[in-house]
Image: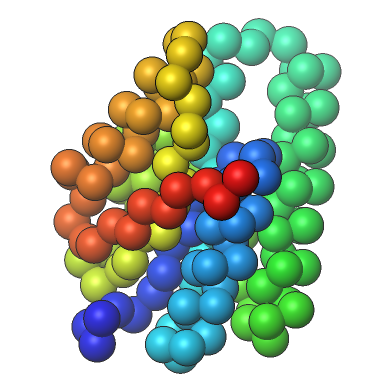
């Protein structure tokens, strides 16, 4: 962990993401490194409505702002960023070798969303050029 320069925390609008932010920000404070919260919007390819896209952006900005407030409670200044694209690909493009990714594992076992979430964390672990810490939900 001595070579880590930045912690990247990929999130979505879920309760487990809130837990990951708390853990990631705490670790950033302990290690004395910068942290950045990112979220990937992969709906652009499916939504052709400007109104729906604006509504989604406002919702995303709101939960990113909530996560930023969690970091401030720990005394950590944190940046947030919204990225558009395929989640695993964009996370991997975003990180550097001296980063640490802290991300959630969703305990979804049925349906399409479960297989998508599992593939994102698995793909990031397999392809990222840096270490990845995957946290399971406490709930």
| Quadrant location of the N terminus in the rendered image | bottom left
Q: Is residue 86 visible?
A: no
Position of the C terminus, as image quadrant, is top right
Q: Position of residue 33 (x, y in %)?
A: 44, 84
Residue at horizontal 47%, vertical 13%? 110
Identity of the residue drawn at 42% across and 69% down: 7
- Does residue 9 appear in the picture of this structure? yes
Relative to the observer, which residue lies in front, 51 or 60? 60
Where 12 falls versus 43 (above or below)? Answer: below
Image: 37 above or below 126 = below
Image point (82%, 18%), residue name: 51
Q: Is residue 71 above or below residue 67?
A: below
Residue at the spot x=47%, y=88% of the render? 30
User: Foreground residue, 42 or 1?
Assistant: 1
Please tell me in which quadrant of the rendered image residue 48 appears. Answer: top right
In the rendered image, the residue lying farthest to the front is 139
- Residue 67 lies left or right of residue 38; in this view the side is right
Q: Is residue 135 left or right of residue 29?
A: left
Location of residue 44 (image quadrant): top right
Residue 2 percent location from the top left of the image: 24, 87
Locate residue 104, reporting x and y percent: 46, 47
86 lies above or below 100: above
């Amino acid at each position: 962990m001595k070579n880590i320069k930045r912690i990247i925390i990929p999130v979505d609008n879920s309760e487990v993401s809130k837990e990951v932010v708390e853990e990631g920000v705490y670790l950033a404070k302990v290690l004395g490194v910068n942290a950045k919260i990112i979220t990937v919007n992969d709906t652009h390819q499916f939504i052709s409505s400007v109104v729906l896209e604006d509504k989604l952006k406002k919702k995303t900005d709101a939960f990113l702002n909530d996560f930023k407030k969690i970091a401030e409670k720990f005394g950590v200044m944190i940046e947030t960023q919204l990225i558009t694209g395929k989640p695993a690909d964009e996370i991997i493009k975003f990180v550097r070798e001296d980063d640490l990714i802290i991300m959630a594992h969703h305990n979804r076992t049925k349906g399409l969303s479960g297989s998508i979430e599992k593939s994102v964390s698995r793909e990031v672990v397999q392809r990222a050029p840096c270490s990845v810490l995957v946290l399971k939900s406490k709930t």
